[in-house]
Amino acid sequence: MRFLNQFRAAPNLLTLMRLFIIPFLIIEILDGHYRTSFALFLLAGLSDALDGLLARALKQRTTLGQYLDPIADKLLLSTLFVVLTHVGLMPRYVTVLVFSRDLGILLIATLLFATGTLRDFRPSLIGKLNTLVQIVALLAVFCEKIFVSAHLTALRIGLVRTIAVLAPLSAAQYAWLVFQRMSQQAPAT
């Protein structure tokens, strides 16, 4: 599929929609409209689930989608952590850990891809768990603002602490896996 035609593929249109949602989600959070921001976050999550299903069902897996989807995911999550920290709903240290991890992985992947050193950037099990906990923590933050509850507060605090452990742990595992993959390729080249 030609590059410009890849933009017309249904899964990529959903991913582009997710990117388009981000500024509106930020505005709603900054304006304190948590019900709307919660709805937009759910819409972004639904588009993420649907783009993968559509790519498989319609056989529209594209090179653009392989890069655009994880970029959209990371941009959405990292941006939410930064904005929620700005409005006082997420501790700074957690946002720094999340953002540093994602930026580090992005820089390493870009460098290795650009140099042709490595092109295998599958997420690790701990990385997937970290992303899941981040998503649930963000949902908990929104729910806590909408449905005030001590249980939601306790859940959010526990999830935030879990992220503080998983983010650096998953970054270390990612670095280890990249090192191993590079070491396996070295004898072959």
Image: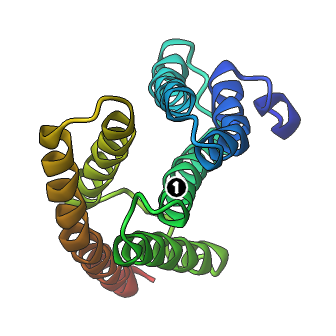
Residue at x-position 14% and y-position 57%:
158
Q: Tell me residue 5's x, y (percent).
A: 83, 28
Residue at x-position 44% and y-position 26%:
49
Q: In this view, does 21 lie above or below 182?
A: above
Would residue 166 appear left or right of 154 to someone viewing this image?
A: right
User: Toward the viewer: 67 or 90?
Assistant: 90
* Residue where numbered disc 1 is placed: 74
Tag 1, which secondary structure? helix
Quadrant of the image occupied by residue 125: bottom left
Q: In this view, does 23 lie above or below 82?
A: above
Outermost right residue:
4
Badge 1 local density, few (<14 within 10 Å), some, or many (20+)? some
User: Toward the viewer: 72 or 151?
Assistant: 151
Q: In which quarter of the image is the N terminus?
A: top right
Q: How is the image coloured?
A: rainbow
Would residue 95 appear left or right of 160 to someone viewing this image?
A: right
Task: State how many labels appear.
Answer: 1
Residue at x-position 59% and y-position 55%:
75
Would residue 90 appear left or right of 3 to someone viewing this image?
A: left
Q: Tell me residue 115's x, y (percent).
A: 63, 81
Q: In this view, does 94 lie above or below 28?
A: below
Residue at x-position 56% and y-position 49%:
76
